[in-house]
Amino acid sequence: MKYGKIIFAIIFLSGISVVNAAEKLFSVLKDGNLTVEFITPKDDKACLEASMIIEKYIYKSTGKRADAAVGKAKICFQIEKGKMDPEGFRFSFPSADKMVITGGGPNGIKYAALDFCERFLGVRFLYPGPAGEHVPKIKDLNIPMKEYSDAPKFQTRTLGSGNRHWSRQRYQDWFPLHRGAMPYRVDIGHNLYKMFPPSKYEKTNPDFYPIINGKRYIPRPPRLGLHWQPCMTNPAVVKEAIRIICDAFAKNPDLRTWGLGQNDGDGYCECENCKKFYPVPDVPHRFGSKDRSLLYLQFCNKIAEGVTKKYPEATFTVFAYNHTSIAPKNFKLHPSLIPVITYDRLNWVDPERKAKDMIRQSSWSAIAKNVCWYDYFYSNQYVLPRVTSHHVARQLREGYNLRVRHIYIEHLPLGISGFGGNEQIWAEGPLAYLVLKMLWNPFQDEDKILNDWYVTAVGPKAAPYLKSCFDRIEDFWINKMPKSAWFKRCARTYLVPTWHDYLNVIDKDFFENCSKDLDKVCELAPEGDCKTRAEYFRSAFQNRRNRCEYWIQNQNVRLHRADAFTKLFFKEDFNKGFDGWGIYEHRKYPGTFVSHTKKDGYKNTGAAELRCRQGHTGGIEKTFRISQPMNFRMEVKYRCVGTTEKVIPYISAEWCDDKNEILHSVFYSDIHGVYSEDWSTAVFNFTTPYQLPGNLRIRLCISGSTKGKVQYDDLIILEAQKK
C-alpha cells in the first residue's frame, strides 16, 4: 500500500472532519458530549429506527446517551415519498442549529443513518459478527454544513444468503448494514409453478398444463417446479394469470412487482398452437438449448398488457436463460418486462465466453428498457475462497453501462447450503464488503475501498501483508484458474464449487506464501480488535489450507495402483443381510426402502437392495473409528434393476466427528456408478484427513430414479501400507 493511502485511511477513520477553516460547521459532539437532540415524526417507525441507529453508534463511540444532549441544535428525520428515489437520502442544513436527514422511503431513511455512521463517525462493518464491527472513539464531531444527497445506481442489490435458516443469521444481519436488500423493487424467481399448482387446477383446468410427447403432462411431487411449463398459447392461462396478479396487487398496495420466471428446466408445451412459435428449423441455439424465447415472451407480454391496464406502474421479471437465452429479433417487449440474464460472470476471464455472453446481453438490451443480472458467487463455498474483487468491480461498471439496473447474486457465504456443510468461517476477506459498496455506486475507486478495509481491519502496518494475501488469492482465480481442466468443463451457467480440481494448477509455494503474509499480519497488528481480527484471518486461512491440501493429497492417493492396497480392512458379502449397517434416509421422505435378497446377488448370493422412491437419495451406512493415517481402496458390485437411466448408484466415504456428524472441514470421497443392468464395479481410493482420530462413514446410496431398485454386493475395503 502506498504511504499516502495509509495516511488517508488513518485520517478518515479517526472520525475527524478535515475541512476548510472558512466552512460553516454543524456540531454534533464536543468533548465527548452530544450537542444535538434527535427529532422524529410521531408514529414514524422508519425514522425512529434511523435515529436509533445513529444514537447506538454515538453511544458505542462516546459512552454517552442521546438523552444527555446539551444545547438546542437538532437533527430531524423525515421521509419524502415520491420526491426522490425510495432508497435515496439527503443531508441538509436549513439553519445553523438544524440538520435534516431525509429519506425517499423507509429504506432511504435507514440508509441515510448508516451513511451518517460511516461518513461522520468512521464506523465500519467489515464482516459478519461482533469482531467485524469497527467503531472508533471520538470526542468531537463537526459536520460541514453542505447539502449532500445520494441514491443507489443499482435498484436491486442482493448478495443472496438463502432462506432464514438459523445458520445464516450472522450474514443476514450484516449485509443490510451495507444497504443491501432482498429484492423488493422487482420480484425474481421461478414462479409459474407457484401460480398454477395442479392441486388447484388439475381437475378444473387440465388444459393449463403442457402437451409433452403427445400426452397431457400433469406435474407431480417432488418435481412440481421442474421440467414443465403451462400452455403459453392458452388464453385461459393468460386470463387466470392476470386475475391472480391483480388480486394480489389489490390485497397489498405496496406490491407492484411480479415474477414471471418460467419453471426450471424444459417441458415447453408441444400443442399445435405453441409449436407455431417454435423456430424453423427447431435446432439448438448457440447456447445449447432449443429456442423458446418467442413462445415465452409473447405469453409474458399478454400478461403484462392485461395487468398494466389496471396497474400501470407494475413491473415483471422474465428469465433469460436456457431455452430463452437469446431475445427474438424484431420483437417488441412490453416496457414493464425486465429480463433476468443468468450467468456466472467469472466466466468473463475467458474472452471467448465473454464475447458469447455479450451476444446474449446485446439481444436483450436491444428490446428491453433495462435488465437484471443474476450471478453466482458461492465464494466461501469453494475450498479456496473465490475472491475476485477487482474483476467484480470492473464487471459491475460494465453492467451499469449496459443498462443493467438490478443485480441478484447467489452468494451463500455462511450457513447451511446445498453444497454441504454449515459454513461459519468467514474466509473471503473483503469481497462481500467491496461488492456491496460497488452495488450502491460502481464508479467508486475499488482500491480505495479495499485499502480502507485492510487498514481498518488490522492496522496500517499489517494492512499491506493482508492485502498481499488476498491479492495472491485473486491472482489465482483470475490468471491461474482459467488454465485448469476444471474451468474447461465448467462452461455452463455457473461454475461448480463442489468440483475442486482447479487446485491442480495452484503454485506449489502458494499456501506457504499466504501463510507467511498472515504471520506477518499477526506480528504487526496492534493489540485489541486489530490483533483479534488478524488471528481470525490467519486461522480461517489455515482451515482452508488444510482443506485444500487434504483434497490434493486425496487426489494423489486416487492415482495409486490397485496393487498398492494389500491389507484387508473390511469385507461385507451381504449373504446374511446387513446387520450392523444403519439406514441413511432423505430427511423429507423417511420410510422403509431397504431390503435383502438371498439369491439375487452377484454370483447368485445375498445382496442389499435399495428401492428408488420419488427420485430422492437414500442408502445404507456403516462407521469405523480411525486413529492413524491410512490410505484405502473401496470396491463394490452393483446393478440397476427396473430403474430409469437417470438413476445414480454411488458409494461415498465421509469423515465424521464423535457425534457422527459430518466434518465439512474435510471432503468426502465418492464415485458415481454408471447406469448398468449388468453387475458392474464401482471403485475409488481415498485417504484419511488431517483431523484424527475421526470416524469413517461408508455409504451405499441411490438417487434420481422414481422406480426400480439398485442392488449392492461384495463390498471390500483394502488398506495400503501406513504413511
Image (cartoon, rainbow, N blue to C red):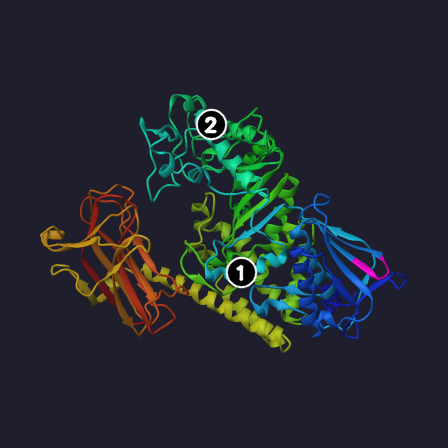
Q: Quadrant of the N terminus?
A: bottom right
Give the residues in magenta. 95-99
Measured from the top left, where is residue 468 in percent x and y? Answer: 60, 64
Left or right, residue 700 beside residue 309: left
- Among the two numbered marks 1 and 2 on one chain, the one whose residue lies closer to the N terminus: 1
**Which residue in the protein does label 1 denote?**
171
Our reading of the magenta stretch's main secondary structure is strand
Measured from the top left, where is residue 98 in percent x and y? Answer: 82, 60
Q: Is residue 319 visible?
A: no
> Residue lying farthest front?
42
- Residue 559 lies in quadrant: bottom left
Measured from the top left, where is residue 308 in percent x and y? Answer: 58, 31
Looking at the rendered structure, which numbered label has been put on residue 218? none
Distance CA(mark 1)–CA(mark 2): 40 Å
Q: Residue at x 56, y 25 (%)?
A: 331
SS at mark 2 in the image? helix
Q: Residue at x 47, y 56 (%)?
A: 505
* Amino acid under disc 2: Leu
The vertical placement of 17 against 588, above or below, is: below
SS at mark 1 in the image? helix
Left or right, residue 513 beside residue 278: right
Measured from the top left, where is residue 388 in percent x and y? Answer: 57, 54
Q: Is residue 309 visible?
A: yes
**Which residue in the protein does label 2 denote?**
295
